[in-house]
């Protein structure tokens, strides 16, 4: 969006108004692929309609990495495809010549180039000898890789040989602080991607083949981007990457994520800093201590565990066990008092027995996880688990029933723990009117990540006639439900 806007395109969120339609796709699991294809077919209709404005349809993202040649072969109305590693090709695909002249109007939050340039100059202030050579930062990663990544590459982890229609070349792109960017999130909150790709061998997952080897952005570039966002009014930054806890390993850093958090947490104007997608055995003591040390870092740990039964985790090639994970959670709660834990599990992984499932239930009961997602196993061609013996594959009915039972169990745990929130005074970022009813407003505390966790519903504005979305208020929790709580604004 930033590149298109920066080179003269006017952006619209309404497909019927667009001359060029870009569909950003996912192909992680079957349901995501289906959703992507359905959207492409729906958008193509805009091009086919008599009198329709659409002249070009571009498909971008992970579906292109998986089925590059097949997309245009099967849907000839698609004019161009742009993979995850060739962002700059979007201009060519859109028929735009790079001009460097932005249109003024946009329904999205534009980060002006002048500020991006200012952020670039701020890089010098934060330069880190471990990560900066002083040379201009290229868009394509020019840094090393992790030894694990090199080893797994030799073992074929990133091979796309079994995929018809995909090219062999893996993406190696990384954006930087001077890549034009537009915020599509509410103004006070933004994501920053700190690394791209993944070197892990999880046997259910094709993300490494889609996104390439793990590579970190330079710390100075991330800090400059954060400063730029804060100058634009962003007050909450969420760091993401396929695995944020590997951050910096390819740059020669130890505990790189903790170092990055130290650098970001003290930026003036930043209220909340959080990071998602940690890898369990990489949540170090130093990382937890860093969370505890800074008041700006949300006491929120997102650690997808995927399962709790050791044999299942072994077949997933993730390692760990219920005992190891319980110890990790206990340690996190000890070092970071009041921390909330988010995790996700996969049920129905090939070979998951009733005993494995019961172990997962027992783990959830013991761990009392705050926010929990349960996914059903999806058999993906190209993932190592796809080739496991068919006899090991769990019937869909069993998978669905196990998911339902776990969600019910979690509902009980959540209802009880949310009751303990009543009476607490908290900082609340008000987001706006509730999507469900105009009688209520909604907000989040530092213990709620954007978009995925329960909500804080606001039914009492306290001394205010109205509230301002994107603003922080002090509030008191007055009621609790299964996942959501209700708050009254205090000041
Ligand atoms: S760590 Fe996450 S992205 Fe990487 S292979 Fe495992 S599940 Fe996939």
Image: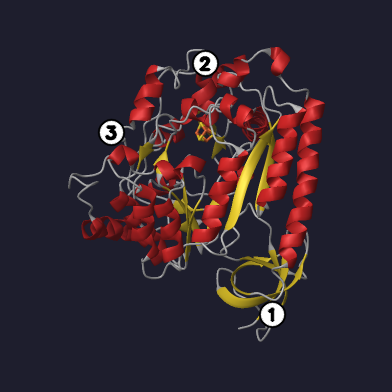
Q: Residues within 10 Å of mark 1 (few under 14, many from 20)?
A: some
- Cβ atoms under marks 2 and 3 closer than 8 Å: no
Question: In the rendered image, which quarter contains the C terminus?
Answer: bottom right
Residue at (51%, 18%) from the top-left corner? 69
Sequence-wise, which precedes: disc 3 or disc 1?
Answer: 3
- Residue 144 marker: 3
Task: Count up the numbered dots.
Answer: 3
Q: Quadrant of residue 233?
A: bottom left
Kindly tell me whether mark 2's CB lies below 8 Å from ligand 1.
no
- Residue 131 marker: none
What's the CA distance linking mark 3 and mark 1? Answer: 53 Å
Q: Taking 156 as reference, is 57 above or below it?
A: below
Residue at (54%, 40%) from the top-left corner? 19
Label 2: which residue? 165
Q: Secondary structure at mark 2?
A: loop
In this view, the mark in front (1 or 2): 1
């Amino acid at each position: 969006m930033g590149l298109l806007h920066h080179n003269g395109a006017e952006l619209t969120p309404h497909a019927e108004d667009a001359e060029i339609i870009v569909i950003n796709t996912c192909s992680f699991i079957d349901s995501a692929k289906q959703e992507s294809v359905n959207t492409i077919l729906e958008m193509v209709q805009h091009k086919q309609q008599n009198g329709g404005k659409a002249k070009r349809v571009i498909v971008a993202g992970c579906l292109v990495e998986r089925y590059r040649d097949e997309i245009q072969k099967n849907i000839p109305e698609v004019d161009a495809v742009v993979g995850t590693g060739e962002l700059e090709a979007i201009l060519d695909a859109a028929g735009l010549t790079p001009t460097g002249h932005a249109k003024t109007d946009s329904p999205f939050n534009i980060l002006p180039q002048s500020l991006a340039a200012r952020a670039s100059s701020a890089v010098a202030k934060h330069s880190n000898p471990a990560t900066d050579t002083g040379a201009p930062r290229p868009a394509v990663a020019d840094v090393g890789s992790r030894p694990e990544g090199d080893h797994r590459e030799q073992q074929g982890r990133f091979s796309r040989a079994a995929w018809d229609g995909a090219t062999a070349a893996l993406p190696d792109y990384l954006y930087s602080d001077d890549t034009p960017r537009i915020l599509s999130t509410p103004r006070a909150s933004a994501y920053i991607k700190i690394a791209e790709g993944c070197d892990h061998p999880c046997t259910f997952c094709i993300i490494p083949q889609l996104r390439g080897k793990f590579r970190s952005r330079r710390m100075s570039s991330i800090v400059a981007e954060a400063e730029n966002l804060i100058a634009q009014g962003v007050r909450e930054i969420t760091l993401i990457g396929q695995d944020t806890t590997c951050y910096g390993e390819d740059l020669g850093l130890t505990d790189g994520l903790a170092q990055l958090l130290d650098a970001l947490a003290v930026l003036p104007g930043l209220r909340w800093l959080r990071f998602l997608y940690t890898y369990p055995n990489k949540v170090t003591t130093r990382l937890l201590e860093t969370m505890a040390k800074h008041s700006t870092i949300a006491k929120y740990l997102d650690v997808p565990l995927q399962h709790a039964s050791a044999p299942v985790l072994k077949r997933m090639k993730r390692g760990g066990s219920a005992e190891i994970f319980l110890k990790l959670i206990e340690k996190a709660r000890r070092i970071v008092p009041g921390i909330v834990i988010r995790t996700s599990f996969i049920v129905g992984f090939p070979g998951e027995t009733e005993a494995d499932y019961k172990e997962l239930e027992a783990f959830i009961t013991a761990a009392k996880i705050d926010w929990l997602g349960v996914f059903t196993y999806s058999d993906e061609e190209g993932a190592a688990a796809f080739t496991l013996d068919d006899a090991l594959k769990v019937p869909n009915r069993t998978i669905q029933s196990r998911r339902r039972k776990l969600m019910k169990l979690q509902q009980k745990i959540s209802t009880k723990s949310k009751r303990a929130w009543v009476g607490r005074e908290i900082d609340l970022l008000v987001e706006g009117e509730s999507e469900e009813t105009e009688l209520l407003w909604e907000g989040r505390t530092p213990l709620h990540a954007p978009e995925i966790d329960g909500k804080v519903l606001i039914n009492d504005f306290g001394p205010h006639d109205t509230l301002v979305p994107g603003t922080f208020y002090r509030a008191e929790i007055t009621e609790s439900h299964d996942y959501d709580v209700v708050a009254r604004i205090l000041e």
